Image (cartoon, rainbow, N blue to C red):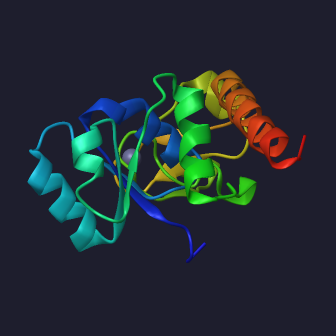
Amino acid sequence: MGAMPRFLCDAMLGSLARWLRLMGFDTAYEAGGEDGELARRAAEEGRWLLTRDRGLAAAGPRTVWIRAEALEDQLVEVFERLGLEPDPGCFGSRCAACNGVVRPVAREAVEGKVPPFVLATVDGFRICEGCGRVYWRGSHVARIGERIGRVLDRLEAHRVPG
Ligand SMILES: [Zn+2]
């Protein structure tokens, strides 16, 4: 966990930021900010700067110029460029909305924060320490898993020669 890289995504990469968080990576996002400010923040916080802006990507050593436009392609690009292997054990450990740490929480603690039907039928609640958002296993989690699974399959396929 300690060796996991941290990221800063530029304004063009909001979806990528959310998905990196879902995969457990500490990922900041700047909706605005000029180039110099982005580069400075990334350096100060020890983050890799991910950007769609070729000029900005040339500004520092710890930057990745994201060429792909589709989300899954962008994820594959980040992992391949950095030689990273996503750790399934970390999936779901960051809040997609705010980048806060998400931790398991008792059922009683989420009473009133989730619909009664969900409270009665679902196990395995988790809560974001940053914004208080509650996560639980449900159909949206299955879809997230499918998407991440496709990305992992592609990384695996690229590693096998021929
Ligand atoms: Zn949050």
Picture quarter containing residue 2?
A: bottom right
Residue 119: image location, x then y, percent: 63, 33
Picture quarter containing residue 90?
A: bottom right
Q: Quadrant of the C terminus?
A: top right
What residue do we see at 52% from left, 38% from top?
19
Say which of 32 and 78 sits in front.
78
Residue 99: image location, x then y, percent: 39, 51
Residue 110 appears in the picture as rendered:
no
What residue do we see at 22% from left, 72% from top?
44
What residue do we see at 43% from left, 63% from top?
6
Q: Which residue lies most toward the bottom here? A: 2
Residue 151 appears in the picture as rendered:
yes
Position of 117 with respect to 67 (left or right) is right
Position of 54 with respect to 133 (left or right) is left
Q: Quadrant of the N terminus?
A: bottom right
Say which of 109 and 73 sits in front.
73
What residue do we see at 58% from left, 26% from top?
116
Residue 104: image location, x then y, percent: 61, 57
Residue 68: image location, x then y, percent: 48, 28
Picture quarter containing residue 55?
A: top left
Give above or below for 123 relative to 8. above
Say which of 21 and 133 sits in front.
21
Give above or below for 3 relative to 101. below
